[in-house]
Structures are given as structure tokens and as C-alpha cells.
Image (spheres, grey):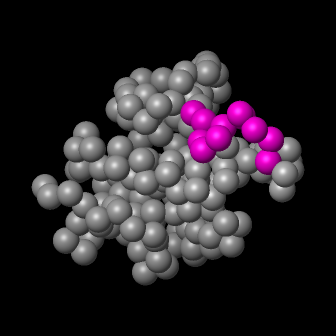
């Protein structure tokens, strides 16, 4: 497969994004959602992120969306305004080909350019070695594991917390 194009998401991409996420919800443990959101809900979520000033990218190959990544608020309280949480999902047939890494590198650069200072990864399932490894390659450090906090597919799942600095990180205090 040739290198995909990484570009900002447009609303026309949302049916493909919805399908990728539906598969992740139905068959995977990266997300703890149990019922896949429909296109209307995915559109609402997309607009809320874009309207909030957060980046959202897709990986496209031969005109087809094969993955996506976005950053959103880590927590709603104002003191967290310089910290984002990332998400990345891929077409299941294209895992382990470096597409997630390309999406994350673009997302990290864009978040830093927008003035965010920290990025948190909340990774579903401590057995998700692919996501943990990709985050490590992107400079994330392990900050902890919450054992057995989610129940999906009849088993308890952990969440893994990873973090990396963006831009100036905590080296300076923004004047906002």
C-alpha cells in the first residue's frame, strides 16, 4: 500500500469514519462504548470538536478513508484547557502498517501548533499492544493503568494511561 494522504476531515468523510468506529465498538476493546453511534451522533461529535478548536484528521488512500484521528478536551474544567486527549482508529484490515503512526504524528504537530501543552492517551485494554507501541513511538510515557474498570464482551478490561508534552509543555505558563 502506498503512503496515505493525511488531511483535515470534512463532513463527507463521516460515513466512512462511522463505519470504522462501528467495527471498533462491535468487535474491539479500544473503545468501551457498547452500542455504535449512528451517523447523526458521529456528526454531532465531529462538529463539537471542530467548533471547539480541536484538530480532526483522516488518512485517505485512493479516495477512501482508511483511518482517522482527533484530539478533544481531556476534561471539561477550565484548568485542563491546555490538555487534550487523543483518539485514533483504523480500518481493521490496515492495522500495523504505520497509518496510525502517521495520523498521530500529524495530530501531535497540529495540537502543539494550536497551543496545547499536554496530550493524554486513554487506551482501552492493556492487551492493546499495537496502540501502546504506537504511542511509545510518538513519545508518550506510561503514566498508569486502571485495572478492571470496563466490562465488555463478558470480561473486565483495563485502561492504560499515557502522556506526552506538546510544544513548550510545562516549561512556561501561557498568558491566555
Foreground pick, 32 / 69: 69
> What is the residue that sits farthest to the left in this orientation?
1
Q: Classify residue 164 as left or right of residue 130.
A: right
Q: Which residue occupies 79% across, 48% down?
A: 174
Q: Which residue occupies 58% across, 50% down?
A: 112
Query: Can residue 116 be seen in this snapshot?
Result: yes
Query: Can residue 119 be seen in this snapshot?
Result: no
Q: Which residue occupies 67% across, 50% down?
A: 116
Image quadrant where one finds the N terminus = bottom left
How many marks the image carries: the answer is 0
Q: Classify residue 32 as left or right of residue 102.
A: right
Foreground pick, 110 / 143: 110
Q: Is residue 165 magenta?
A: yes
Residue 156 vertical placement versus 135 (above, below): above
Location of residue 138 by image quarter: top left
Q: Which residue occupies 75% across, 38% down?
A: 172
Residue segment shown in magenta = 164-174
Foreground pick, 136 / 161: 136
Image quadrant where one finds the C terminus = bottom right
Residue 64 vertical placement versus 85 (above, below): below
Q: Classify residue 149 as left or right of residue 68.
A: right
Q: Is residue 5 magenta?
A: no
- Residue 113 drawn at (x, y percent): 58, 56
- Residue 132 drawn at (x, y percent): 43, 29
> What is the residue that sits farthest to the bottom in this orientation?
12
- Residue 52 drawn at (x, y percent): 71, 66
Residue 141 vertical placement versus 32 (above, below): above
- Residue 59 drawn at (x, y percent): 34, 61
Amino acid at each position: 500500500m502506498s503512503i496515505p494522504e493525511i488531511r483535515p476531515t470534512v463532513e463527507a468523510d463521516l460515513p466512512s469514519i462511522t463505519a470504522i468506529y462501528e467495527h471498533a465498538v462491535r468487535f474491539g476493546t479500544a473503545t468501551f462504548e457498547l452500542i455504535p453511534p449512528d451517523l447523526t451522533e458521529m456528526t454531532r461529535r465531529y462538529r463539537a470538536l471542530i467548533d471547539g478548536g480541536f484538530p480532526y484528521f483522516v488518512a485517505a488512500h485512493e479516495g477512501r478513508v482508511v483511518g482517522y484521528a482527533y484530539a478533544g478536551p481531556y476534561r471539561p474544567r477550565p484548568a485542563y484547557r491546555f490538555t487534550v486527549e487523543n483518539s485514533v482508529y483504523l480500518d481493521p484490515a490496515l492495522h500495523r502498517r504505520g497509518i496510525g503512526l502517521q495520523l498521530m504524528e500529524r495530530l501531535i504537530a497540529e495540537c502543539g501548533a494550536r497551543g496545547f501543552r499536554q496530550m493524554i492517551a486513554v487506551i482501552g485494554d492493556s492487551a492493546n499492544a499495537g496502540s501502546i507501541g504506537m504511542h511509545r513511538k510518538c513519545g508518550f510515557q506510561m503514566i498508569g493503568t486502571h485495572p478492571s474498570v470496563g466490562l465488555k464482551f463478558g470480561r473486565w478490561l483495563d485502561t492504560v494511561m499515557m502522556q506526552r508534552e506538546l510544544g513548550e509543555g510545562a516549561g512556561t505558563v501561557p498568558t491566555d
